[in-house]
Image (tube, rainbow, N blue to C red):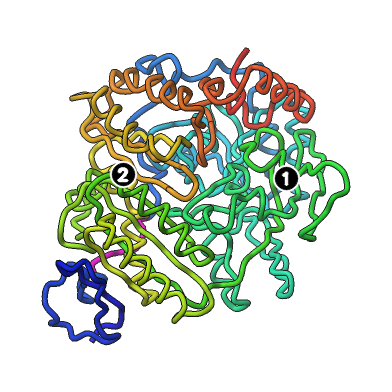
Amino acid sequence: MISFRSFVVRPSSKLLFFPKHVPRQYGKSVFSKTSAYYEQISSNPIRMASTTSTRMMGSSMPESRKRAKRGEYSQLESDDISHFSNLLGKHRVITNESEIEGYNVDWLRAIKGQSRLVLRPKNTNEVSKIMTYCYERNLAVVPQGGNTGIAGGGIAVHDEIVISTSLMNQIVDVDEWSGILVCQSGCVLETLNEHLSQYDLIVPLDLGAKESCQLGGNVSTNAGGLRVLRYGSLHSSVVGCEVVLADGTILDCMNTMKKDNTGYHLKHLFIGSEGTLGIVTKVAIQCPPKPKAVNLAFVGINNFQNVLETFRLAKRDLGEVLSACEYLDQETLSAVFENLQLKSPIESSFPFYMMIETSGSNGKHDEEKLSMFLEKAMSKEFVADGTIASQPSHIKNIWNIRERFPEALLKDGHLTVYDFSIPLESFNEMVEETRSHLGPLAKRVTGFGHLGDGNLHLNVTMEEFNPATLAKAEPFVYNYVAQRKGSISSEHGLGSIKRDYIYHSKSPQAVSYMRELKRLLDPKGILNPYKVIPNK
């Protein structure tokens, strides 16, 4: 017996529920899957950062992707390494080339740095001492968390010293009354969720990389993820942070009150600034209650207009229990079939699919709302087919398909991922226009993303990296976004690969003030150089 709710579409377009417990051999309803289906889905793969890069930022690249000219920083010397060894101990100072390789390559195997030194501090004071010394010596540094970013923000462009926060993984406090968690910046997202479960709380952030990414990196890139629709961005949930500035100054913005209206909110400067203004070492974040009841629908849809109609209906009819709303196209799901040999939760093929999650405190109430919503969506012919899961293991495994999209696409050979905020009605149009524009230069062009916050992930794969493909894609895709008043970086940051396109989303005046702010907090420019702010 398996225990999850399923529904089938009859010609009458009525929504019919099976009993809670369904025999294994209950037929081949496209809205039902046996436990064998869920057991086939494995967990996320180990990150691939140590793999040799297939794309270096060298002379074969388009101008926008070439490695920036090295700044006038000091060269690393043996005396510097000795100093750091005395400060941290030799076991937390990495100089071996093979050990450093994992810190020098991003997980897409797309960007390779040239750092010759990795430092692994355990606390804020050690970070402060490192930065004080680097400031005096004019040594450039790059902060790095879980190295799960895809814009190059955490990879050294030249020989910057990598400051890894992986050992800064202590949970300081959980206020069970207010729900505010205080922890060091190197805490892994999934580890935090496991710790919070004893308080019936969750981190208000859910990413595919949650088993590797660190909260400090999430804050520094203002990571979004699956549930911005429900909980908002990190600008709304982070209530305080501790930051080490370029000269070693420890800036204490560690407020743990939800409301604080005493002057400027300096914490917001460091949320999304990608380590260019300071290194986040500690975070205080508001954590919501863990939902008692969660349901997830995976549905097939015949056209993109019906995707929009279904989303609008979900917002209206599911209201307070709607926690995530994702879309994907058939090309994305095909990559999962072909490259990971995973099956779809539904047997029929459709041009588009949606994942609609509800979470709340009353299971019966939520199920009734979801069933009424789906019945209405089918009666209006917005939704053609689908399945519902309510058991945690089944929900996790369906989400696992979503979280493995990048892995599946990467197996095509080479993957370039774009992360845009554009009007919802432009999602599929952008995918189709990019596909047409690139033609045979791309193996596959796909789209998936967060409908709830207008975030499209546009993906271009190649059997092997071809500079001509990238040269044709850029600035085409950035121009498309700019023409629609969107953002060229919705949640991944600008890093090193998008910084020169910042003017597609920001005015020259805004960039000028950003540059002045950078100069104020980091006069020597040693914090994560070559990132975010373009050359004049």
Q: Is residue 495 visible?
A: yes
CA distance separating discs 1 and 2: 51 Å
Within 10 Å of disc 2 (Cα), the crowding (few <14, some 14-19, many 20+) is: few
Q: Residue furthest right?
A: 262
Residue 314 in percent (x, y) is at 42, 59
Kindly identify the residue that appears in the image at 28 percent across and 43 percent down: 409
Kindly identify the residue that appears in the image at 23 percent across and 29 percent down: 442
Query: Is 171 left, or right, of 357 in this rendering?
Result: right
At numbered mark 1, what does the secondary structure look like: helix, strand or loop?
helix
Query: What kind of residue is marked 1?
Result: Val
Query: What kind of residue is marked 2?
Result: Gln
Residue 36 in percent (x, y) is at 20, 74
- To which quarter of the image does residue 110 belong? top left
Kindly identify the residue that appears in the image at 33 percent across and 72 percent down: 389
Residue 207 in percent (x, y) is at 47, 54
Q: Magenta includes 42?
A: yes
The residue to which callout 2 is attached is 305
Residue nearest the observer in this picture, 467 or 167: 467
Q: Examine the residues drawn in magenta and state their main secondary structure.
A: loop
Dot 1 or dot 2: first in sequence order is 1
At numbered mark 2, what does the secondary structure look like: helix, strand or loop?
helix
Kindly identify the residue that appears in the image at 51 percent across and 34 percent down: 489
Q: Quarter of the image for the N terminus: give it.
A: bottom left
Image: magenta residue range: 39-45
Position of 390 relative to 152 (above/below): below
Within 10 Å of disc 1 (Cα), the crowding (few <14, some 14-19, many 20+) is: many
Query: Is 524 left, or right, of 42 in this rendering?
Result: right
Residue nearest the observer in this picture, 464 or 451: 451
The residue to which callout 1 is attached is 127
